[in-house]
Image (tube, helix red, strand yellow):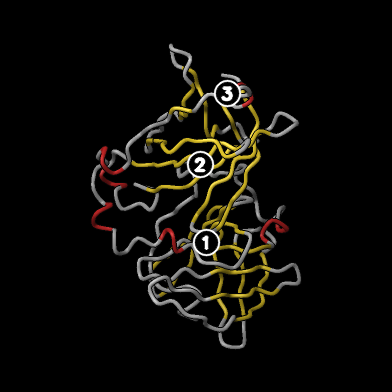
Amino acid sequence: MSTKLFPICLTAFFIAGCADKAPSNEPLSLAQNEEHLVGIWAMVPLRNGIANVVEYRADGKALLHPFNCAEPGQPEVEQSDYHVADDGQTIHVSSALDEFDLKVLEFNRRTMRLGLHVAGSDLTFAYLKVEKAAPLCALYQMENLQAKATPYQQSDFVPAPRVPARPDLDRFLGKWAIDTGQVQIEIRRDDDGEAFLYQANSENWRHLYNAVHWVGDELHYQSYAYSEKESLYRHPYHKSQHATIMQAQPDGLMKHSFFIGETRHDLVLKRVSD
């Protein structure tokens, strides 16, 4: 099997902006939703720097874009054929040089995890659906791994969640969630009437915000996540920081954008009640 396509290394599962749950939609069966596989999928970088991108096309072709964050270069694109099993549980990949089956462990419209059995080992690879064939090298943290695998300290990221006042601020207040009801961000008012960014703690993750400011009608800020569990200190989401933008829409919805590296990801959120 091609070592460039699926190297023998276990990767942690990362979901940009939300590591407890998928950032968009509930899990899907690939058997009934094969059309959602079509598109570009970027692999969460492995510790050796490999961060390949695979484009699944509607004509049954898979284009592999080999990337290595530790060794930048422009390798040639590799083409294979792929076929989803009738039960949606495996993806068969074949080329003139090799063929193998990938087990579909988790799948939804924005993320997936694939498994591969090699030489007696079960390997797992995490993917995020993206707009262009570019690696997620912003998640590659080899040099900072030891520094990041420590408890959060305030000097790591100083929280300053207050939202500057403006006449139409009420359009931004409230809880904002994806279609499945999972809240992505909330803007509250304190006892003095000051607005601030907030996200409830989950079992594994805490969220902080700073650099909150307006750019035209957009609310810009930095979001930061960390865990208090030592077992998650080496997780890519621990001590992760992302630029984020909120923009109220005319129909009452909210456009919520975040950046992983130079790649922008957009969600449309709706206001939900408690």
**Residue located at (50% from left, 27% from top):** 164
User: Disc 2 marks which residue?
Assistant: 21
Residue type at tag 3: Leu
Give SS at disc 1.
strand
Eyeballing the image, is 120 above or below 88? below
Give SS at disc 2.
loop
Q: Residues within 10 Å of mark 2 (few under 14, many from 20)?
A: few
Dot 1 or dot 3: first in sequence order is 1
Q: So how many labels did they put on this image?
A: 3
Residue 258 is labelled as none
Determine which quarter of the picture holds residue 225.
top left
The Cα–Cα distance between marks 3 and 2, rounded to whole angstroms, is 23 Å
**Residue located at (49% from left, 74% from top):** 67
User: Disc 3 marks which residue?
Assistant: 173
Give the foreground label among 1 and 3: 3
Give the foreground label among 2 and 1: 2
Q: Is residue 1 visible?
A: no
Give x and y (percent) for residue 181.
Answer: 60, 31
User: Considering depth in this image, is 219 or 127 the residue closer to the camera?
Assistant: 219
Residue type at tag 1: Leu
Eyeballing the image, is 145 above or below 101? above
**Residue located at (24% from left, 57% from top):** 146
Determine which quarter of the picture holds residue 200.
top left
Q: Residues within 10 Å of mark 3 (few under 14, many from 20)?
A: some
Residue type at tag 2: Lys
Residue 114 is labelled as 1
User: Considering depth in this image, is 37 or 17 the residue closer to the camera?
Assistant: 17
Give x and y (percent) for residue 234.
Answer: 31, 53
